[in-house]
Image (spheres, rainbow, N blue to C red):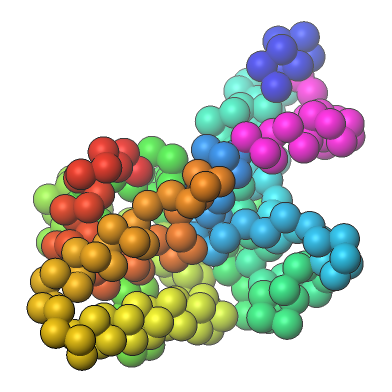
Amino acid sequence: MKSYRTSTPGNTWEAFSKKTGRKTQVQQQLKADQNGLCAYCEIDLLDADEDENGVADFRVEHFHPKSATVAGSHNWHLDWHNLLGCCHGGSKNDVRDANTRFTSPDHSCDVPKANQNLTSVILNPLTGVPAFPGVFKCDRATGMLSVNTNNCNKAGISPVQAQQTIDELRLNADRLKRFRKTVLDRLNYQLQEQVKIGIAVPQAMDQLAQAYLCKNNQQQWPAFFTSIRDYLGPAAEKQLQAIGYQG
């Protein structure tokens, strides 16, 4: 993209992405940079599955609206630091795993954001969310995401802006709450099973943190990473510090 932008600085994302190879290269790099997760909701970004005729649950999002580009000014279309990899936010009926992922009109992520300029309203996933401490928390009983105000204050993050991130991106859409609850219920079940065989809770939490808070062989984090992190508490923070987590 850098060479394309240098040679054609005024071109649009649409012009750039007409060539499938260029678009695919950008998508693959974004997915790798984000370790396989949607920049907003942290669902896993699924590739297309030709056997199931399901399209990829992935698209390129411009954090600052590309429509805000004015001739002769900064070109938001082709600014690499303005690009995010996102899911379709429940809006696409032919997406892979559509039976659980297509929930229109229960949308999230860049779908409700649309072309709004929310740059000063919500947190930018690339620059506005610190590695430590975690600024969001998740209720296991409901899967609802909320703001960890104390941690926001420690990190110098506005709790109001963090809450606006949840609200504007609809990160508590029923679909996402259901997904998060499923993940945390599974974790809780595994914790209980560990305790049943005589493993102390702190040790069991450590073992779960080591098992879950690591990248797979494709260098991807588990879906709903933040919710898992919050559930595992101090064990998660110890694990993330140990592996040199940088966000």
Indicate left or right for 176 with 107 as reference. Answer: left
Q: Is residue 149 above or below residue 22?
A: below
Q: State the residue at coordinates (44%, 65%).
A: 224
How far across and down, in percent of the image, does residue 130 sit?
28, 45
Q: Which residues are magenta?
A: 10-29
Q: State the residue at coordinates (20%, 44%).
A: 242
- Residue extending farthest top: 7
How far across and down, in percent of the image, does residue 170 sit?
51, 71
Screen quadrant of the N terminus: top right
- Residue extending farthest front: 197
How far across and down, in percent of the image, does residue 129 sit?
33, 47
Q: State the residue at coordinates (62%, 57%).
A: 45
How far across and down, in percent of the image, does residue 228 sit?
34, 67
The reply to whether residue 21 is visible in this rendering is: yes
Indicate left or right for 201 with 138 as reference. Answer: left
User: Residue 247's image quarter?
Assistant: top left
